[in-house]
Amino acid sequence: MDGAGYRNRPLPHGVRVCHRHFYFARHAGKQRTLCYKCRYRSSAVAMTNQHKAYLLAAMTVLLWSTVASAFKLSLRHMDPIQLLFFANLVSVFALFAILLVQKKIHLLRAYSRRDLLKSALLGMLNPFLYYLVLFRAYDLLPAQEAQPLNYTWAITLTLLSIPLLKQRIAAAQLIAILISYLGVVIISTHGDPLSLRFSNGVGVALALGSTVIWALYWIYNTKNRKDPVTSLFLNFLFGLPLAFLAVVLTSEIRVEHMAGLVGAVYVGLFEMSVAFVLWLGALRLARTTASVANLIFFSPFLSLIFIHFLLGEEILTSTLVGLVFIVAGNVLQHLGNRSMRTAAVTD
């Protein structure tokens, strides 16, 4: 019944009138039951946010799926250090613009000297060392090999978490690691794992080495309670002078072809800055992290499609088989992490 006629009358204990819609809504201490209109509106908002989360996550996955091709196209006209410098420069301006739009510039004042020093050290890991090693790996390997190998960073993170974070490893996670690295061997040997003849040993080592750098960056970031976009901006800001020194000492600041510069701008915008912000937005709006995080497993397969059509690489059967092993290992490890967290909560 409509509660408008009872607004000024005494009501039974625990019964209140919803002043938004004038329908009865019961309150029992801190527990509140909304009237049916408010409940419907709350549910509708939650569903709308979830749809937005899926949209942002899908956009992020699509962008991440294109970056392997963007790396290779850019490296046709620039060396890895030049690509690092120009992409880093673009990312600093892009992240600063994002901070302005989000009205977060004032958060920079909250950083102490210690915080800034930590940001500088992390900036040495990412973007400087990580992208320097990764771009060199892409320069030596076909994109269809470098991209799946770099995708093993989650497995590397698990391995490094054992000594650095004192985390335990379950049997399922150990199996996941073995499955993923079997995929690495299949891709690196072009489907002949018993031969152990790698297509390019240095390139494979660099691609796997980039996962170590990226995992270290995430591990040392675990205790960071600052705004993530602001922190990323500072990392890239402090990484820029290192990239500048590297390009001055070992290469040159020169653009021979506009295609290279366009590629660097694309990498700086969509790999180093915008995609990260979109992913954060997806995680913030999603009902649960898992509801959008699972979409990331589509990225390496979509990436192969772009690699084939944009770079003209013939996708080898060994690449597909190896990638299936790598993704299966990541999924198994993801499920193992969830079960361990559930067990910890139960205990």
Image: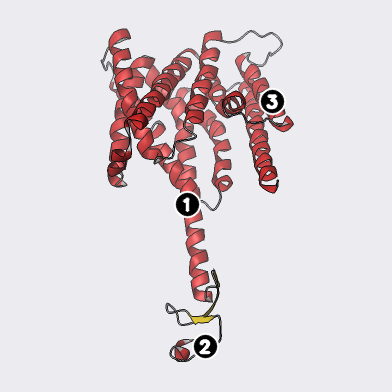
Identity of the residue drawn at 36% across and 21% down: 84
Residue behind mark 2: 11
Q: Position of residue 68 (x, y in %)?
A: 47, 26
User: What is the spatial separation of the Cα atoms under label 3 and label 1, in whole angstroms?
Assistant: 33 Å
Q: Amino acid at mark 1?
A: Leu
Identity of the residue drawn at 29% across and 37% down: 96
Q: Amino acid at mark 2?
A: Leu
Q: Position of residue 293 (x, y in %)?
A: 55, 42
User: What is the spatial separation of the Cα atoms under label 2 and label 1, in whole angstroms?
Assistant: 38 Å
Quadrant of the rendering where the N terminus is positioned:
bottom right
The local crowd at label 2, few if under 14, some if 14 to 19, many if 20 or more residues have their Cα within 10 Å, is few
The vertical placement of 190 against 37, above or below, is above
Tell me the number on the disc at residue 179.
3
The vertical placement of 205 against 90, above or below, is above
Residue behind mark 1: 285
Q: Quadrant of residue 114?
A: top left
